[in-house]
Image: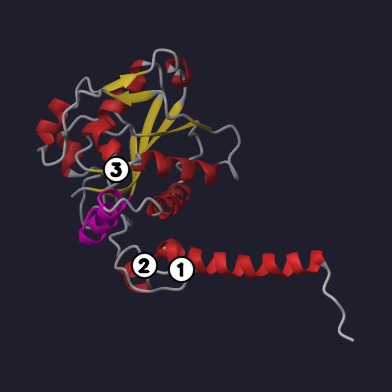
Amino acid sequence: MRSRISQPERLRALGEKLNRYINKLLDIIFVSNIYCIGCGAIIDKSRKYSLCNDCMENMAWTSGKVCEQCGRTLGESRMEKRCYFCRTTSHSYDRGYPCTSYHEREKKIISDLKAGKQAYIAEYLAEIIFDKLISCNALNDTEILMPVPANAKNEKQRGFNQSELITRKVFEKCVENIRGLQYYNDVLHRDKKGVQMKGQSSEERRINIKGQILLSETRAHLVRGKTVLLIDDVYTTGATVDECAKVLKSAGATKVCFAGFAIGN
């Protein structure tokens, strides 16, 4: 005589079956787990940064001799310690830690994140940025992580501020290893009446960004006497980062650095 299956066992088996279906469905929905974020090639889920071998090897990583201020890659034969842009422009920030140069592969990743609204990419960029910061010992004296505030219109259209997503993920990785580090996303904000920067020249950006980065009067005290690390997806001309650093230092921040996935050429 066949033994009867108890109700708890039947529910347990049903739950396990349901979990298998859910996991399969998640694998289909979250394609980030099986496609390279650089080229779209199918990859193993365990691939670092969700990059295939080709993209990992040929990404325009900043390495070797870099500009001592913005972090751009310099030619090994260059005698200068700073790049042309930093020699000809006065910056308010102290040091930059970009992970890559902004070439076609990197532009595709950022376009998919922002224009394609593929927010999951932010997690992989956060991993890349975190590893860069660790390799450069950039977190040794950092006390506050802060995202570069986004243009309100762009954030509304996109549904998220990619810099905030990236910074939150970096912070989550940091708190596992660094005590006392703080994350604030409400100290700086952008003037809602501010103009769009896309397509503008470096000089136009520097002129138009003035007065667009605003400081919260009730939160300004948090940065007094602190070292702040700003995080953004792309450093294009440095105008926005400079304005943020200028505002933070006016509130008493002693040092302001930045980190990002890519830096413009």
Q: Position of residue 177 (x, y in %)?
A: 59, 44
- Callout 3: helix, strand or loop? helix
Q: Residue furthest bottom?
A: 1
**Magenta stretch encompasses residue 101:** yes
Q: Is residue 155 left or right of residue 12?
A: left
If you read the primary sequence from the N terminus, does the residue marked by circle 2 or circle 3 appear first? 2
185 lies above or below 130: above
Q: Which residues are magenta?
A: 99-115
Q: CA distance from mark 2 to mark 1?
A: 9 Å
Q: Which mark is residue 158?
A: 3
Q: Amino acid at mark 3?
A: Arg
Q: CA distance from mark 1 to mark 3?
A: 28 Å
35 lies above or below 158: below
If you read the primary sequence from the N terminus, does the residue marked by circle 2 or circle 1 appear first? 2
Q: Is residue 186 left or right of residue 60?
A: right
Which quarter of the picture shows residue 175? top right
Of 263 and 198, the residue lying toward us = 198
Of 70 and 3, the residue lying toward us = 3
- Callout 1: helix, strand or loop? loop
Q: Position of residue 223 (x, y in %)?
A: 45, 21
Q: Are marks 2 and 3 in contact (CB under 8 Å)?
A: no
Q: Which mark is residue 47?
A: 1
What residue is disc 2 on? 36
Of 212 and 134, the residue lying toward us = 212
Q: Are marks 2 and 1 in contact (CB under 8 Å)?
A: yes
